[in-house]
Image (tube, coloured by chain):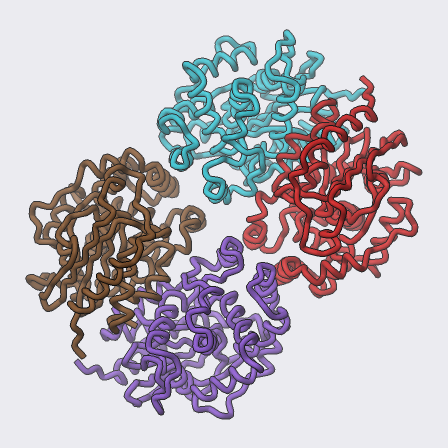
Chain colours: A brown, B purple, C red, D cyan
Amino acid sequence: MAYNYRTIIEKAYQMANSMEDEGKLATYIPELANVDPSKFGVHMTKVNGDNFGMGDHLERFSIQSIAKVLSLTLAYKILGEEIWKRIDVEPSGTKFDSLLLLETNNGIPRNPFVNSGAIVICDILISHLDDAREEFLAFVRKLSDLPELNYSDKIADSEKMYGYRNVALCNFIKSFGNIENEPAVVLDFYFDMCSLEMNCQELSYTISFLANNGYKLSNNEVIVSSSQSKRINALMLTCGFYDESGEFAFKVGLPGKSGVGGGIVALYPNNYAIAVWSPKLNPHGNSFKGMKLLEEVTTHSEMSIF
Amino acid sequence: MAYNYRTIIEKAYQMANSMEDEGKLATYIPELANVDPSKFGVHMTKVNGDNFGMGDHLERFSIQSIAKVLSLTLAYKILGEEIWKRIDVEPSGTKFDSLLLLETNNGIPRNPFVNSGAIVICDILISHLDDAREEFLAFVRKLSDLPELNYSDKIADSEKMYGYRNVALCNFIKSFGNIENEPAVVLDFYFDMCSLEMNCQELSYTISFLANNGYKLSNNEVIVSSSQSKRINALMLTCGFYDESGEFAFKVGLPGKSGVGGGIVALYPNNYAIAVWSPKLNPHGNSFKGMKLLEEVTTHSEMSIF
Amino acid sequence: MAYNYRTIIEKAYQMANSMEDEGKLATYIPELANVDPSKFGVHMTKVNGDNFGMGDHLERFSIQSIAKVLSLTLAYKILGEEIWKRIDVEPSGTKFDSLLLLETNNGIPRNPFVNSGAIVICDILISHLDDAREEFLAFVRKLSDLPELNYSDKIADSEKMYGYRNVALCNFIKSFGNIENEPAVVLDFYFDMCSLEMNCQELSYTISFLANNGYKLSNNEVIVSSSQSKRINALMLTCGFYDESGEFAFKVGLPGKSGVGGGIVALYPNNYAIAVWSPKLNPHGNSFKGMKLLEEVTTHSEMSIF
Amino acid sequence: MAYNYRTIIEKAYQMANSMEDEGKLATYIPELANVDPSKFGVHMTKVNGDNFGMGDHLERFSIQSIAKVLSLTLAYKILGEEIWKRIDVEPSGTKFDSLLLLETNNGIPRNPFVNSGAIVICDILISHLDDAREEFLAFVRKLSDLPELNYSDKIADSEKMYGYRNVALCNFIKSFGNIENEPAVVLDFYFDMCSLEMNCQELSYTISFLANNGYKLSNNEVIVSSSQSKRINALMLTCGFYDESGEFAFKVGLPGKSGVGGGIVALYPNNYAIAVWSPKLNPHGNSFKGMKLLEEVTTHSEMSIF
């Protein structure tokens, strides 16, 4: 059966947009607190090349933690399965446990998408690349076909000023020996990495190689192997939404990743990648309207992997 | 592309069977400790009705926790989405946390597959059915087309004699008000429920409605709705293997559920259900050879939902 | 310097009695919920035999957990230092951790005054005595010179009806092998033990051997050795008030033990034992007015061990 | 009864010295790893001015965490009871929990002697003094009558180089808002504070004001009030030995504080202060021989507060 994706997305967008937005803006840095909270956009990129969007889908926003999928991809590409000696692949339970679990696991983060895991990924990239900051940017530019893409110094600097929790995590892991470089250097790169800005169209296109068995859509270049692509997807499904990962798998049924800037990406293997953006967050730190839209899309279609 | 499932399974079976079995028998009750540890069987039931198996696939074993999928199905069928007021849908992190998390969550179990969650499901069935023990059995007989299927008193009695941990869990949840019936009554049913015995053929057939959008294969009877079927699958993917759930999603990439008797079921929506059995368990409590076989099946084919 | 204890206590009583009582009655069993919340009594027994009291000091109340000091004394007398193989001597941190700590410590309770520890003490007494219930009662009758003292069946039965949390603890410890007898038997004795009723005069006299290096006041009989007496006192200081133990040591500076019935005993070695009773409890489960009175007594005198 | 303290200490020293030392040197910085492990000294300072020592009691060592008693004293002197808004007075349970408890307590450390609490004390001193580093040193010089006493740059620098865990703690607390100054500044002072070196004679004299109701022995100068002195002693008793605090109260029965350099101070109010030093540590991080000596002193005398 062929779905009319465009119609389904339009309906889901209208539905989610008509709901009262119960979310709240992230306020820990001015760059996120000052975003217009009414913004709402969605864009879908199909593996056959079709793509379409609605609302504020062409306006750039801070992708924040969504970038962790890209840094994991680059590190996985470089190290292969060796990477799992330094990071586990299990959901983290609750926010609550993250530090306790780090302690019981001797500094091995639960997965690459919790902050501690993403920090270890940054450490890996610094150890294996001549200039991690530049080479990661080049990698994302290639994935996105956006040669002018750049880090946002304003956002990165703001994060650095208030990022005490991440400084704590990085030094804690270092004390177990699972960070090789100096914490200050690792964190600088980490904050840069999370400062990238894209719009929904660019983001759904950038991530679409994971819906395409690891091949870049435009030229069939192998970004990661088919097996690696499947494994990154599995990780997004089980760990992509912090302590709401089970809920997302349950209600949406797709691999995905959210960011505190209000963006979410999700993908249906062999079909499409989708990006939504709405800045107000639910109590778990995920975009309120974005979650509703995606839930609507997969509930009222049968577009779920289950 | 059409796969030759039979060939893939035969190869995976040979591979797993040739490995040194690093697992250990469950020994907490004599009924599990005395099983022949060399047993190894697999059976696949495709949604088109084809089915085939190998090794000890026609010998019955104690399905243990795999029965939790069936009790959840019946309770979900009865209560609908109301059920999630009493049980959450999130992975539990580690074994470690189960009691801590129960405490911080005021007696709401993390998901229906951890013991605490399955006990709450039993409580729900007792409250909503005239005779939960008989009606649950009738439900499984219908699903399996095995009118003579019965509880194993020997196994249930053994579990009751050593089940102090489960008595603790049930009373702990009761202290928060999330058990309605008397703990002794709830636990009796719980131990009965886990005492069912099937062989791989019967088990893969019994579970196949979840690979078929909720419809029973033989007569297209609606067991649960398509949406409920997807959600049970999502739960199996994120929570089906205790603290190894992420690893299973990562390496096998299918919804599944394991039991301490050495059985595992897994399924590929719209394609097939599969059951494996090998009694020796890895340190996480999942069948050592069973996990290897399933990993081989999905790695060397492309039969993964990701 | 000689203190006029009577004057100090009178002033402290007046002060505490004039405060607004911010506490709340324990309500989990009717026998505690129906107590007159305005009751307030205090009685001091000096090691020289002098004793005096005020307010409702001659009215009996449920001593609850204060009895744990007496059961520990009997078990310690029987087993000597062997007892610490089954129970630790460390404060428990918070309420919160009790189950987590039991798990990480393989079923060894943190100390003999948390519920789990007192349950293990009951198990020890059952294993080492012909009839623990009768022999413990005889022991308390001897300590108190109250030959007619008895368990309160009404209170014990009520506790049994609502004691799910304690059933959970006992079975949890049993699952680690640190309970030798059947949980139901151990718990029956535990609930009986906590059902004793005394008034402030009787209670301060009963406990006074711990202020007298282990010798009973009236006849110098050795109840426990001087070293054991000191060690029980040390345990009361560090662990006698659950997660408010540090606060009590800090503000009152005496070994003591509280009960959920609103009673508290405390003692100044070589000087006196004191018992207070006021049924309304602060958020930590300790008598609101009782804590205030004792704080006043030691702050405005210099009657602290520090 | 008058004890012959000198004889008791000599016997305890001989006994402890004849035991096989099961401890291990702290090795995380070269300055501690290179100390002669056979060193063993003890010195007692009585409140009547008498003092005597044995073994290596005149050789200086790194007092490490023992300095936390002195920094707490200065901060308590300045802020009074206000100080307890930022630090609690409860034992911390286990090492294990420190981070979990910090999280559940919103960045309020459990007590002033765990690292997190001592770091908050440093922050308080920096906020309330013009030059915390110099003024704290002046305070210790005055207490010890050692005008030439100084920080050890070598030790402080070494700690800074390997102190990732403390950097983590400080930034974690900062993320909750309970550190006012920049983490790097607070930590510099913290490492300096812990780098002081004294010998047993100097240390027992320095700490003796706490055995003397807050008055300095030599000139009766009020260091802290009698009430504050008692409260610091209570804190040492309940929290002075990390997760072995209960054990120390139980076996030794005196307020005390240990350091990872192998030093321990303890005191008997209105009687004496004692300092021991032996570099090899038991698994809890407290001097193996030092603990044995103090246990012997109080067990075989009756010199315990209980």
Q: Residue at x 45, y 48 (%)?
A: A100
Residue A224 image point, x, y percent: 17, 60
Would you identify the image quadrant in which residue D292 lies?
Answer: top right
Q: Name above or below for residue B138 compared with residue C156.
A: below
Q: A180 or C197: nearer the eye?
A: C197
Residue drawn at x 43%, y 67% as measured from the top left? B282
Quadrant occupied by the N terminus of chain A: bottom left
The relative height of residue D135 versus residue C186 in the rendered view (above or below) is above
Q: Is residue D189 left or right of residue C258?
A: left
Residue at 70 percent of width and 55 percent of height: C119
Residue D182 point in image, percent of width and height: 35, 27
* Closer to the camera in the image, C10 or A121: C10
Relative placement, left or right, of A229 versus B142 is left
Q: Is residue C306 visible?
A: yes
Q: Position of residue D116 (x, y in %)?
A: 47, 33
Residue D10 appearing in the image = no
Quarter where residue D2 is shown: top right
* Of the pair B193 and D136, the residue shown nearer to us: B193
Left or right, residue B151 beside residue B293: right
Instruction: Give the quarter of the figure containing the C terminus of chain A.
Output: bottom left
**Residue A127 horizontal/vertical position (percent):** 23, 44
> Number of marks in the image?
0
